Amino acid sequence: MKCDQCSRPATVHLTEIRGGKKFEKNLCEQCAAKLGSTQGVGHTPINELLSKFVMEHSGVQTEPPAACEHCGITWAEFRQTGLLGCATDYDLFERDLAPLIQRAHEGATHHLGKAPGSKAETGAIQKRHVDLAKMKKELRRAVEAEDYERAAALRDEIRDVEQQGAV
Amino acid sequence: MQVRDLTKGTGEWLRGIGPKSDVVISSRIRLARNVAGFPFLTRCTARDRQALQVQASAAIAQCNLGPAVEFLDLQPLRDIDRQLLVERHLISKPHAALEGARGVALSKDETLSIMVNEEDHLRIQVLRSGLQLADAWAQIGPIDDQLEQRLHWAFHPRFGYLTACPTNVGTGIRVSVMLHLPALKLTGEIEKVFRAAKELRLAVRGLYGEGTEATGDFYQVSNQTTLGRTEEQLLEQFEQAVVPRIIEYEQHARRMLLTERTVALDDKIFRALGLLRNARLLTGDEALFLLSHVRLGVHLGRISDVDMAKVNELFLLTQPAHLQMILGKELDGDQRRAARAHFIRQKLGAG
């Protein structure tokens, strides 16, 4: 297919809906760049996405949220005292809190154990968590012992359990 | 309830009975809980605190938490009354020192105490003499359930029970055992226990918890991690793995001292007894230190004319608030030292 504007091969294909009507454009890279279509509104370039991903997973803090609307505490105030202001803070600051909590609790990320209310339901989820934790430990041991057959079997079991429920 | 009446006994934690009580003084489980809909205490207004106290004490009264549970408002109490509760491990040091509305619900046998408005809205605590964690868990679980029905705990699907400090989040549980380890101290092997505990992410503290020195060879071992492990897993670690090993280690050290360093051991024990029976001035720390050696001597059968219950009692009754409460008057530091020495001489019989 050739570019709508010149004779070079079209590599950028755009579909626009305007007033309920569909318009299609086929452009070469040069013409598309001139029209500014390769970075249309709402698209995030891949490098930006990647760096954001890396930042979020490297513990480097981007701007934390403003003060909690319920208790008024800010992230800076929490860092000073080590005490949060209300239950909502765990959601509001979750991104920044999660790595701190993980460090304080030997790498744990989720609650296991007693829960209020619907005990049967949480019980099943927790059992899955406990089973998974056990299997992962065993897997580590199998790898350390170079028992790869056992390790492979455990890896499959873990995958099955993980697929059974959103753990 | 009169705080003064408590001084008539030693309470649960120093009763000196229960399994493994030669080494394990007491077992304790504490649950940190916050009421949904109220800010945590750092952000509570005076009215919030008051409302929390009213709601919590009403809920405690409505629950069937066992015989003779009474709510004690801490605010109007004298400092010495609050101090006495700290010495009996019924409230924490910060809870005694805080300002504002706060209280504690106590069972008459002192196995249960529920602190209201400490760092968290409620801190439920169950105490047992000796190594009895399973028993303590069996008592505290249903208490938590009953209170939950009336107060509705702040709970998060990912982080579990929410606490003011994120280091307590998850189960909100603190399991601790108070150990008496004089032989490991004498043989210098206590450091090994510290290192092993550190590797297991357990905290080792003194007689009165956070920030206190290990006086009288008392060491409190407790968990630090509260997320990612069930209460049962943690209790199992304590009761099956950690505590039995420390007990064995201490007992081994005691046997070793007895067979290989008998004279040196007897010297420590009888020197301590001699001082306690003759001293005219004793500081609290010195009394604990000497009583610790006497306790070891009684346990090993080296001292036969002193009863173990009496030694356990003296650990508690010679603490500053207890001493003043028993004597019925306020005493300054010098007077306390004299009164303590006099009290101990009376109890142990002057040599």
Image (cartoon, coloured by chain):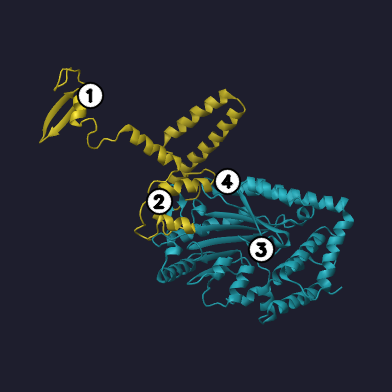
Label 3 and label 2: CA atoms lie apart by 40 Å
Of all chains in the rendering, the one displayed in cyan is: B
Comes first in the chain, label 3 or label 4: 3
Comes first in the chain, label 2 or label 1: 1
Q: Position of residue B66 (x, y in %)?
A: 55, 65
Q: In the rendered view, tell whether residue A36 sits above or below residue B128.
A: above
Q: Quadrant of residue A139?
A: top right
Labels 2, 1: one chain: yes
For mark 2, name the chain: A
- Return the residue at label 3: B13
For mark 3, name the chain: B
Q: Residue furthest right?
A: B263
CA neighbours of label 3 inside 10 A, class few (<14), some (14 to 19), many (20+): many
Q: Residue furthest bottom?
A: B329
Is B90 on the left or on the right of B319, as rendered?
left
Is A104 on the left or on the right of A50, as rendered?
right
| Residue A29: image tag | 1
Colour assigned to chain A in the rendering is yellow
The number of discs equals: 4
- Return the residue at label 2: A93
Q: Quadrant of the C terminus of chain B?
A: bottom right
Q: Quadrant of the N terminus of chain B?
A: bottom right
- Return the residue at label 4: B233
Is B182 on the left or on the right of B47, as rendered?
right
Marks 4 and 1 close (CB-CB < 8 Å): no
User: What secondary structure is found at the residue carrying circle 4?
Assistant: helix
Labels 2, 4: one chain: no
Report the mark closest to the observer, 3 or 1. Answer: 1
User: What secondary structure is found at the residue carrying circle 2?
Assistant: loop
Label 4 and label 1: CA atoms lie apart by 61 Å
Label 2 and label 1: CA atoms lie apart by 43 Å
Report the mark closest to the observer, 2 or 4. Answer: 2
